[in-house]
Amino acid sequence: MAIAPFCTTLWNWSVDGPLAPGQIRATPAAIIGRPVESLGGASAERFPDGVVLCDVWDGAGDFPVNVDCYAAPVDPPEHRVLAAFARRTGRRCVLADDTLDATRHLLVSPDGTVRPVHLDIEPTSVGDRRTNLRLCSLTDPGCQAGLFCGGSRWGPDSVAPTLAA
């Protein structure tokens, strides 16, 4: 069953260093070929069909720049868009993975690789503070005992080259 082209989703990722909000919005726009505009309280009537709304804010921790994209396309997949984003900006990024473990993320490097990692998560007034990056590995007692890591598409100790969008 094919997914209708109008189906959309939410993308949520964090970046390891400062980037201007305009650059953050322009980069996925170039990757997906759709307009990406600031969420900024604007009326939905003002935007053309197919626009992605993007909220960018500074937080804390090792990945302090937070990005939420609303009405993002289903295809290409988020991790492929983020691989292209990381490559174009030269920044490492993290996004939630396919487990229910809040500490487990996918680390997307500027070379396009995707690997599962764990981060310590601390809620703050400006969003979650992500620190203490460590690889998800079967040599880690937490990953050995965890119910979530082994059931992921991104298994412990995996490193996947990702074809950027």
Image (cartoon, rainbow, N blue to C red):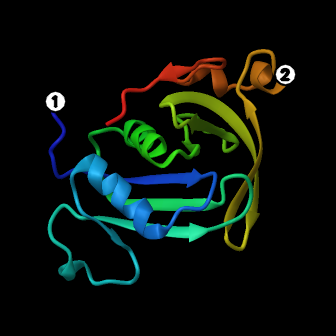
- Of the pair 135 and 23, the residue shown nearer to us: 23
Q: Residue at x 56, y 46 (%)?
A: 91
Q: Secondary structure at mark 2?
A: helix
Q: Quadrant of residue 127?
A: bottom right
The residue where tag 1 is placed is 1
Amino acid at circle 1: Met
Quadrant location, the N terminus: top left
Marks 1 and 2, the one that precedes in the sequence: 1
Residue 81 visible in the current orientation: yes
Amino acid at circle 2: Pro
Residue 73 visible in the current orientation: no
- Of the pair 69 and 102, the residue shown nearer to us: 69
Position of residue 154 in the picture relative to residue 75 (left or right): right
Q: Residue at x 73, y 20 (%)?
A: 137
Kindly report the distance in space between the C-alpha atoms of the residues bearing marks 1 and 2. 41 Å
Quadrant location, the C terminus: top left
Residue 141 numbered tag? 2
Q: Secondary structure at mark 1?
A: loop
Position of residue 21 in the picture relative to residue 36 (left or right): right
